[in-house]
Image (cartoon, rainbow, N blue to C red):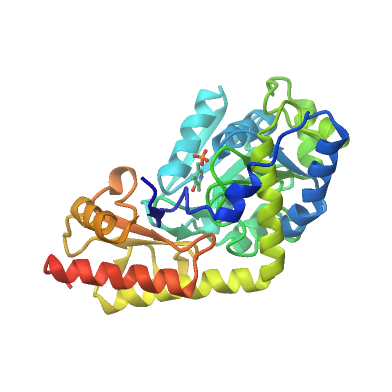
Amino acid sequence: MSYKLFIPGPVEVSAKTYTAMTTPVFGHRSADFVDLYQSVQPGLQTLFETKDPVYISTSSAWGVMEGAIRNLVGKKVLNCCSGAFSDKWYDVSLRCGKEAKALQYEWGTPIDPEDIRRELSTGGFDAITVIHNETSTGTMNPLAQIMAVLREFPDVMSIVDCVSSFSAVSIPKDDLGIDVLLCGSQKALALPPGMALFSVSERAHVRAEELMDRGYYFDFLEFRKNHEKGMTPSTPVIPLIFALKSKLEDIFAEGVEARYERHARLNAMVHEWVDKRGFELLPPREFASKSLSCVKNIKDIDIVDLNKRLKARFNCIIDGGYGKLKGKTFRISNMGDETDATITALLDQLDMILAEVGTA
Ligand SMILES: *Cc1c(COP(=O)(O)O)cnc(C)c1O
């Protein structure tokens, strides 16, 4: 029942990573745990490009996404919405009892920093949510330009989801002035699901101190207090931290820049295939994600059938479109441990199946 995943999360997990997870656990208040926790911190800070602490949460990314709302939104949050994940964040803000406004775009349209400037100039907002890489549409938003605008509004906390771009492209958290940068284990880090990583700026901690309804499990101040002792607030998913340690070794052995280059190169290979086969990407080319490709199904392929054939013959699957784009798009992930060989093989296999069903 095991097959290779080319879906944009979870992605394939290496045997080395799985093996790391079988390390016997120890108490989460033991010196061994403190050693483990502190051993991953420098690597995480390098990847987050930050001097701020990087916290480890036993939850999927949504736990921290909700937590960021509860910790940082006092007055009103602007949710930039342009796909399934970013749209959902508006809903989550409301469910947390916060005042929120959706800055809504068509799915696949990049966020325009000028719209953010216009909205924030009206005042009243004290936080914003932005998804760097909207996975449902394969769109990468212009984060540097967005953050340049946000630096004009020092009262507005920036909460940035880089769940599906973290470790695939450089995201200079401190240079850009991002207050909360968060990601999940099962996307480009190629770890199994169940863990989120996030880094919080000093001023975001100060904001959290002013807010009373932070809850407990995702209270950023609890994370900071425990972090200072090399621990997490509650019993964490220790096997995934072993996996993370193993993965950080892999990442630094390859080299961070080489890793980013590899993601860019494999992504370009998929784009080239898209062009050659007469398909189109959903987002405008210059805003296309570097970690996955969301392709318009302009040839009206039966994607469910295509995936069945892929799985039966080649033991792998791609994604058949997310939410309202199901069937109208398909998505191919190039994140994690993919190589020139694995992406070439996948594209060849897709060609064979498309020839079979008469659409190549
Ligand atoms: C996958 C994903 C999420 C949700 O992550 P979970 O781990 O399922 O909570 C959020 N945002 C983006 C951009 C994603 O790709």
Q: Is residue 103 left or right of residue 278?
A: right
Residue at the location (54% across, 44% down)? 192
Where residue 330 appears, as percent x and y from the top left, is 30, 57
Whether residue 277 can be seen here: yes
State whether residue 29 is above or below residue 277. Answer: above
Picture quadrant where residue 333 is located? bottom left
Where residue 127 appears, as percent x and y from the top left, is 64, 39
Residue at the location (47% across, 48% down)? 10
Where residue 79 appears, as percent x and y from the top left, is 52, 41
Query: Which quadrant does the N terminus fall into?
Result: top left
Picture quadrant where residue 262 is located? bottom right
For this rendering, which residue is in front, 48 or 346? 346
Q: Is residue 225 left or right of residue 151?
A: right
State whether residue 114 is above or below residue 127. Answer: below
Residue at the location (41% across, 54% down)? 5
State whether residue 235 is above or below residue 121. Answer: above
Where residue 303 appears, as percent x and y from the top left, is 22, 54
For this rendering, which residue is in front, 325 or 345? 345
For this rendering, which residue is in front, 237 or 172? 237
Residue at the location (58% across, 46% down)? 185
Query: Which quadrant does the C terminus fall into?
Result: bottom left
